Image (cartoon, rainbow, N blue to C red):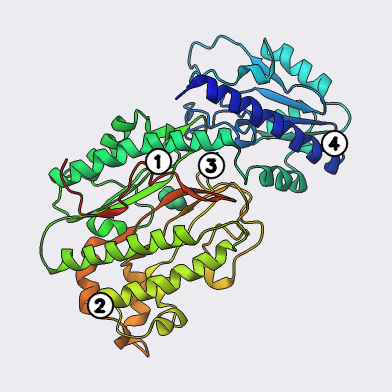
Amino acid sequence: MDRSTLSSLHAEHCRALQLSCEAVLRAQGLDTLVLHSGTPQKRTSFDDQFWPLRPSPWFMHWLPLEEPGCHLIIRAGKLPLLLRPQEFDFWEAPHPPASDHFWSSFEVREGSRAALLAEARALSGGRTAFVGDDLAAAEALSLSAAANGAALMRALDVLRVSKSAYEELCLVEANRRAAVGHEELRALFAGGDLPELQLHLSFLRATSQDDSETPYKNIVALGAHAATLHHVSYEKRAQPALSLLVDAGASFAGYCSDITRTWVKGGGAGASAFGALVAQVEALQQRLCGEARVGREYESLHDHAHELIADALRAVGIARCSSAELIESGLTRAFFPHGLGHSLGLTCHDVGCALKAPRAENAWLRNTSTIADRQTFTIEPGVYFIDALLAPFRAGQHATAIDWALCDELTKFGGVRIEDDVVVGKSGLRNLTRELLPQGGGAPGLR
Ligand code: GLY
Ligand code: MN
Ligand code: MN
């Protein structure tokens, strides 16, 4: 990636963020905002081992520095001031930044923790708010009562919805990194039968990530395991399987990708029917991507996904009744229980796009926004064979609506999900994932 482009886009990002934050400060009656980077969390309260720090996303919105105990001070008309403690620790050291493109946008002060804390206290008089997840750090500045106020957090969350050109570039790089891992797993699955744990480790190796650096725990599900939507209890022994669902991403400068691909191999009626289902989901996922545009309610896209999934269930022969009956009975919700997608950015399930609750039947939908310019989100329809959700429909008035013998056969394949990351602009949609991985699923092929 071209460092000078990244650097100039980052500077532009910070200038715009400064102006937006100044408007938030005015609206909230504040003079100063203190953003705390965070404090490493204990792995267990019974030992003194810590997870690597995941800095607060409100801090990372400005800079990708994964160091604990930093304060970033935002004031009107002033360059953001970074107070960066430099203390020798012979037990642990933070990750160095992956790139040095961001320093020129800050006034940086380095020193002992005590000296910088005194400086932060001196700057925190008057109308100051604290944002961060370590409330002891707020207390150290006597800002407990001014920490993470709901109105302020909501205003800051909204600033994370529409991505700057810098953020888009980071999301492109996060997609590029993850794409390498997806290609690797597609080829490994085509070539043999590896256990899920080996596939997970291969993804980490191909993307040069440690497990704790991934934006979320890799979901690697062979066969029936794909019916557990977040399957992370990897099987360690090799078992022949005809399908593989991989939901895995990567990060760059704090920004996440979130990508799912579903592969099917082998002959036989079951693999052929599951292959037909994957092809249907691939087609409808692409159609939904084509229909996302500025001004549309994301929830209406989710509703449309249920209509398309109903049609797909009929096309494959899983359903015998009308699409309307599939939707009205709740059957499409048994096959597709999660939301169509969510905001994406500094967290995998990013903030600012779920400010109102979805309708009751869309309980798991995490994006209820009107799609705005430069909004970034996932589009991830799926169809799964989850016994507990389908069981209530096996008897009763909808019992004949489904070909249960075919369902039982397809249970061995778990399910299909296809997930891309998209940025929607006034001039159209950019699919960051398909630029790198044109195929969402199907036969894995051989390289
Ligand atoms: N990887 C989690 C999700 O797709 O929401
Ligand atoms: Mn997702
Ligand atoms: Mn995902």
Above or below for 3 versus 385: above
Confirm or deny contact between disc 1 and disc 4 (CB under 8 A): no
- Structural distance between the alpha carbons of marks 3 and 2: 38 Å
Under circle 2, the secondary element is loop
Residue 347, disc: 3
The one of 300 and 59 positioned closer to us in this rendering: 300
Above or below for 243 versus 406: above
Q: Mark 1 points at which residue?
A: 249
Q: Name the residue under label 2.
A: 317
Question: Can you tell me whether the CB of the residue at mark 1 lies under 8 Å from the nearest atom of ligand 3?
Answer: yes
Residue at position x 59%, y 41% in the image: 163
Three-letter residue code for mark 3: Thr
Q: Residues within 10 Å of mark 2 (few under 14, many from 20)?
A: some
In which quadrant will I find the C terminus? top left
Three-letter residue code for mark 1: Gly
Under circle 1, the secondary element is loop
Q: Earlier in the sequence, mark 2 or mark 1?
A: 1
- Structural distance between the alpha carbons of marks 4 and 3: 26 Å
Q: Earlier in the sequence, mark 4 or mark 3?
A: 4
Confirm or deny contact between disc 4 and disc 2 (CB under 8 A): no
Q: Which of marks 3 and 2 is nearer the N terminus?
A: 2
Residue 225 at what x, y percent from top left? Answer: 28, 56
- Structural distance between the alpha carbons of marks 4 and 2: 61 Å
- Structural distance between the alpha carbons of marks 3 and 1: 11 Å
Residue 30, disc: 4
Residue 131 at what x, y percent from top left? Answer: 70, 35
